[in-house]
Image: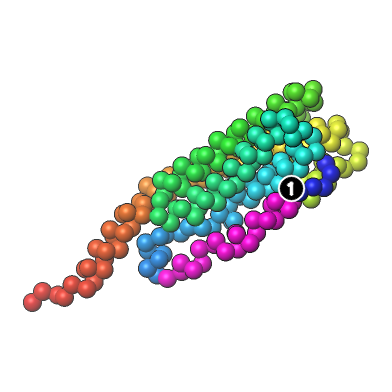
Amino acid sequence: MNRDNGQNRQNGNADFADRQDGRALDSDASGRIYGQHSGYRNLKAYQIAELLYAFTCRFCERYIPFSDRHHDQMVQAARSSYQNIAEGSEDSATSKKLEMNLTNVARSSLGELHKDYVKCLERRNLRHWQQGEAEFEEARQLRPKSLSEAAAWVNRKGAAGTPEERAANLGAILSAQAHWLAERLMNRQAQDFEKGGGFSERLHQARTTARTKNTPPSF
């Protein structure tokens, strides 16, 4: 996998992420009304999905012609996954329903991306590693923190298979892991909603509390 614009695309989101962390909404009133939100950069699902986008950009530019519809399809699915997790976290301040819907869109995109990596292996007659095989378990345990770390693993000398085979299998494994984490995130969001309610309920509770506090005691 040769160096290209995948890392640049990933780094291009850093300024936006630095500005959109919710720290301006740090008053007690904001906490009661908006609840906890905008912490997507700490979510494992987001971290892997963002890395997977950069990885997929590089994979497609290296191995899939731009004229092939799968090129754009895979890049769009990867972009949708991390962007919708981030947007859902941002929107959770005023809409838990929208947060859950967007997380589900991300989950679906990751599922489609996983299928695309598997299809890529099939179309190119590359071996699809299976659970329990040494190569699969090594890739599953890799958990790369950066694109350069993932690329170094793909391109290392003496490894089994071709770099293309290793890259496609790693993409399939990372997308499956991110899909699982997105499902876990959806479960947690559902539990948080059951426990704390949504924006409208918090607004009502805040106004009720304020009126009670400001009502003079009866004689």
**Above or below, comparing residue 172 to residue 198 in the picture:** above
Secondary structure, mark 1, is: helix
| Residue 126 visible in the shown view | yes
Looking at the image, the residue that sits furthest to the right is 158
Residue at 54%, 46% in the rendered image: 84
| Residue 184 visible in the shown view | no
In which quarter of the view is residue 40 placed? Answer: bottom right
Q: Nearer the viewer, residue 122 or 61?
A: 61
Residue at 70%, 51% in the rendered image: 9
- Left/right of residue 186 with respect to residue 9 in the rendered view: left
Q: Where is residue 73 in the image (x, y as percent from the top left)?
A: 65, 34
170 falls in the magenta region: no
Q: Identify which amino acid the numbered label 1 is placed on.
A: Gly
Provide the residue span drawn in magenta: 7-27
Looking at the image, the residue that sits furthest to the left is 219
- Left/right of residue 15 with respect to residue 183 in the rendered view: right
Residue at 24%, 63% in the rendered image: 208
**Above or below, comparing residue 217 to residue 166 in the picture:** below
Q: Position of residue 38 (x, y in %)?
A: 51, 58
Mark 1 crowdedness (10 Å alpha carbons): few <14, some 14-19, many ≥20: many
Q: Which of 86 and 16 is in front in this view?
A: 16
Q: Position of residue 77 (x, y in %)?
A: 62, 38
Q: Which quarter of the rendering shows the C terminus?
A: bottom left
Q: Which quarter of the rendering shows the N terminus?
A: top right
- For the image, the number of numbered tags is 1
- Left/right of residue 217 with respect to residue 88 in the rendered view: left
Q: Position of residue 46 (x, y in %)?
A: 60, 49
Residue at 40%, 60% in the rendered image: 34
The residue that disc 1 covers is 6
